[in-house]
Image (spheres, rainbow, N blue to C red):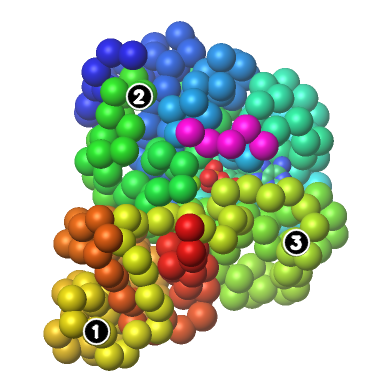
Amino acid sequence: MPETRLLAPDAPGLTEACALLRAGGLVSMPTETVYGLAGDATNDRAVAGIFEAKGRPRFNPLIAHFADRSRVEDFAVLTPLARRLADAFWPGPMTLVLPLKGGLSPLVTAGLETVAVRLPAHPVARALLAEFGGPLAAPSANPSGRISPVTAAHVLDGLSGRIDAVIDGGACAVGLESTILDATGEVPVLLRAGGLSVEAVEALGLTVAAHDGSKITAPGQLASHYAPRGRVRLDVTAPEPGEVWVGFGPCPGAALTLSEAGDTTEAAARLFHALHEADALAGPGGRIAFAPVPETGLGRAVKDRLRRAAAPR
Ligand code: AMP
Ligand code: MG
């Protein structure tokens, strides 16, 4: 693999990215959630390359990204529930698990009869998907198990020399992975908390069911994930000497903050920046402490990621 190229998010950059993707290459693209590592979702070799570059276990399926809804229906069934959710939240930070029709590399779905689908809202991702024309499989552009990237520099830190290019679209606005809902049945089932709040889904008059844990296991659902090199403690109001303290709300003396104002949406947008920065400050074997974050709105997803970052490895 040659050196990873940094592409501008303009017309020549997107044309170059498309040429690489058509040749089965791997390109990291900015989305509103986190940077994705994109490859042609219909090309086995490209999809295998994604798993290889990330060191991701093969049993963990990928999200297929589309430019528009009509293309989704070439590959998956939009159930009545999915239509309702898509009307409200696509394009945006919501992934729907849908019955698979076919046409994708079986590596994308890990051989399942369902497929996870998303229409991202980021203008650069949308432009790339429109120009490419087909679905792009794209997990987060980080080595498996590590902190998700929310800038092009984070992508290069983790995957430089292992992928063909990264399109620099600046920092990700939501800053946290998509909310994954199983929409194969009549009730949405929450598979992963993320950038769309459960409250927003329930405001449609739907009840969101909890995942019973009996379905597939995937790194995003594993106890240890999003791990910095240092040890992480949660719900810390009085940090120990030597700990890098990351605040939420008023936390005098904190090295960093998720949101000085105590806003969970801002905390989501800051979370992976703060984890990368705290990791750099603490160093290998260092210690990081997070102030309490309430589990309302996007705070639920923030807490989910922090628990995995803190889990024993
Ligand atoms: P990532 O690409 O790392 O953001 O993670 C994608 C996640 O989507 C995986 O970890 C799975 O939890 C979930 N996923 C993908 N495809 C399916 C599927 N067919 N059924 C259930 N969950 C899925
Ligand atoms: Mg990931």
Q: Which structural element holds mark 3?
A: loop
Query: Is 196 on the left-hand or right-hand side of 58?
Result: left
Q: Residues within 10 Å of mark 2 (few under 14, many from 20)?
A: some
**Residue type at numbered disc 1:** Glu
The answer to which of 90 and 104 lies nearer the viewer is: 104
Query: Is 213 on the left-hand or right-hand side of 142?
Result: right
Quick one: label 3 or label 1, which is nearer the N terminus? 3
Q: Is residue 185 above or below residue 10?
A: below
List x then y, in percent, for residue 225.
48, 55
**Ligand 1 quadrant?**
top right
Q: What residue span does the magenta drawing correspond to?
A: 55-59
The answer to which of 147 and 108 lies nearer the viewer is: 147
Instruction: Return the residue at label 3.
Output: 213
Residue under the image location 43 percent in, 16 percent down: 25
Location of residue 101 (image quadrant): top right
Quick one: label 1 or label 2, which is nearer the N terminus? 2
